[in-house]
Image (spheres, coloured by chain):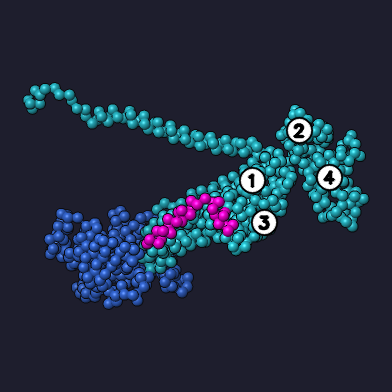
Amino acid sequence: MNNMRKIERDVKMTDTKITARSVNVHYGDTHAIKDVDVNIADKTVTAFIGPSGCGKSTFLRCLNRMNDTIDICRVTGEIKIDDKDINHKSVDPVQLRAQVGMVFQKPNPFPKSIYDNIAYGPRIHGLSKSKSELDEIVERALRRGAIWDEVKDRLDQPGTGLSGGQQQRLCIARAVATEPEVLLMDEPCSALDPIATAQVEELIDELRQDYSVVIVTHSMQQAARVSQKTAFFHLGNLVEFNDTGEIFTNPSDPRTESYITGRIG
Amino acid sequence: MTDITNAPAVPRKATSTELVAASLKRRRRKQIRLQWIGLGAISIAFLMLFILVASLVSTGWQAFTQTHVTLEVYVDPEEVPEDRLPRGGFRDVLGASMGQMLPDVDMSARETARAVEGILSNGAQFELRDRVVADPSLIGQTFTMTVPVSDPYDQLNKGLIERETEEVNRRVKDNEIAWFDTLADSGAISKPFNWGLFTNADSRFPELAGLKGALVGSFWALLTCFLISFPLAIGAAIYLEEFAPKNKLSDFIEVNINNLAAVPSVVFGLLALAVFIGWFGMPRSAPFVGGLTLALMTMPTIIIATRAALKAVPPSIREAALGLGASKQQVVFQHVLPLAMPGILTGTIIGLAQALGETAPLLLIGMNAFITSAASSPFDSSTALPTQIFIWADSPERGFVSRTSAAILVLLGFLVTMNAIAIYFRQKFERKW
């Protein structure tokens, strides 16, 4: 029984959700991402690790075109989600971002009620036709964000009044409320204490069943705990991309080895 | 080791701890000196403010009361025939009742009668006329009426005309003082709060002059100014801050908006005179044109405040909304603008407070005209608070001296209130991120 499930999961992991080919990012004169090729699998947690300033967050932000909002940022190369080029003229970044949700480093709930925080995405995308339908979406999202039990009695209170860990789970719930296919997480636990971190990590593992999760993290332990695939970035290059187990036990590149053993970083 | 102990005694270099200790005293002295200078500067500023307010209050407080005389008025049907009511001899009716209150005075001499009638304000006969016209059944009746006294007697009652002054140098003669004292002794003289200061429009007679016209004019001008500058300035600020490409042109516009905020107001007045009145043929002295002119001045202030408020909204909120798939326009109008609103309102109120006190542009478009009725629309001729102060300060009658100060106090009251509202907004809605 156990074996069967494992096989099933392995098969699913081979489905590629995102393919990136020779992606380059320039910030003005700075060459932030250099010729990155990567395949990100569906229903998998992929971790991006690397020292500060290595470009892992920049690359993550390419996947939902958040870099578009920065004037001096220039992205070249090809990124496809489900074989569709996301940088193509016909793709509206607004639509893309509904498909590719994002959770940020610092919990950033809107200064509105918990309900309105969750309902905002479904509202602007017109995902619900009635109030009761919206209520359902909000409840489902909060359950997915593993925060429903904590906030179900105070949905009308401001989201900013929650604790840091709750705020971050609220933000995750907000991101899944628009039913995305990919969930990007930019160091989602760096502002949280260890207990909140553990809760969020558990949540990430659950979310893997439905989404392709890409997480940027500073913590190698976190990458090892939550991800199945790990990409190591260094100075804008994707140095190594492999199964998480392989990266941490048997890295093929000397730079990866130096990083995970703490010699560079 | 031995080398060191046997070495010739060189002058020991001071350690850094000793050096720090030596400099400490000097540094502390400097700091204390700076604190005293700062304290001195603030004290001088406060002293100046105190002198300003004290001098205004000391001259202005008298204008908040007005001497009145209470009369028994008999509306003689012979003087006021019912068929030509509005043109009746109301002045003679009042003269007759004054004569009754001063029985010792021989009213048959025409000059004396005029002088006695002169105790009453010129407005008294019109007040009586209005009452009788409104209620013709008063003809033939006797009733009591309280009317303002004319300015010299008001001054006398308030002690601003001193009885010790030689008669030739005094506006109120000895016999007139005697009449007034007779009235005062009979209890007919009172000094209630001067509601006329707020309910009357301007007048040639100080005892009748009030700020209503100026308040109404300022209200229309500020309303026009707000309705035009607020949406335009916020629109401009949102475009510049959120949508405009950052290039040479937007830099140029930004520099010029900052310059515009520093342009002397009289220049805007000249511009308004040439463009609004000269070119578009808008009416002179109209609060609407004044409001347009003030809007030109207020706009840069609001633009700058709005841009600062928009900038202060943390990028994390924008990213959160963008990350959910909100369009740029949705991010701005659903998240950034509501969060920036307190800052925008604060800037707007401060801009409007500036506009309220602005005089020079209003002088140039003729809002310093002598107008004795309050404007009923923004297109009627009117004065505004600062220009009314300007007119009164220029008037020769003694009564206008205290009224000018009182008007300044009223203007300052409005300014302080507006700034207090701005501070309230800032404190109430200030957000910690």
Mark on residue B170?
2
Mark on residue B381?
3
> Does B213 sit left or right of B428 as displayed?
right
**Residue A257 in sight:** yes
Report helix, strand or loop for mark 2: loop
| Magenta region, residue range | B246-274
Observer-side mark, 2 or 4, equals 2
Mark on residue B389?
1
**Shown colour of chain B:** cyan
Residue assigned mark 4:
B144
**Shown colour of chain A:** blue
Determine crowd level at label 4: few under 14, some 14-19, many 20+ residues with C-alpha closer than 10 A: few
Answer with the quarter of the image where residue A180 lies.
Answer: bottom left
**Is there a contact, CB below 8 Å, between mark 2 and mark 3?**
no
Observer-side mark, 4 or 3, equals 3
Between A237 and B306, the residue placed more toward the observer is B306
Three-letter code for the amino acid on which mark 1 is drawn: Ile
Residue B11 colored in magenta in the image = no
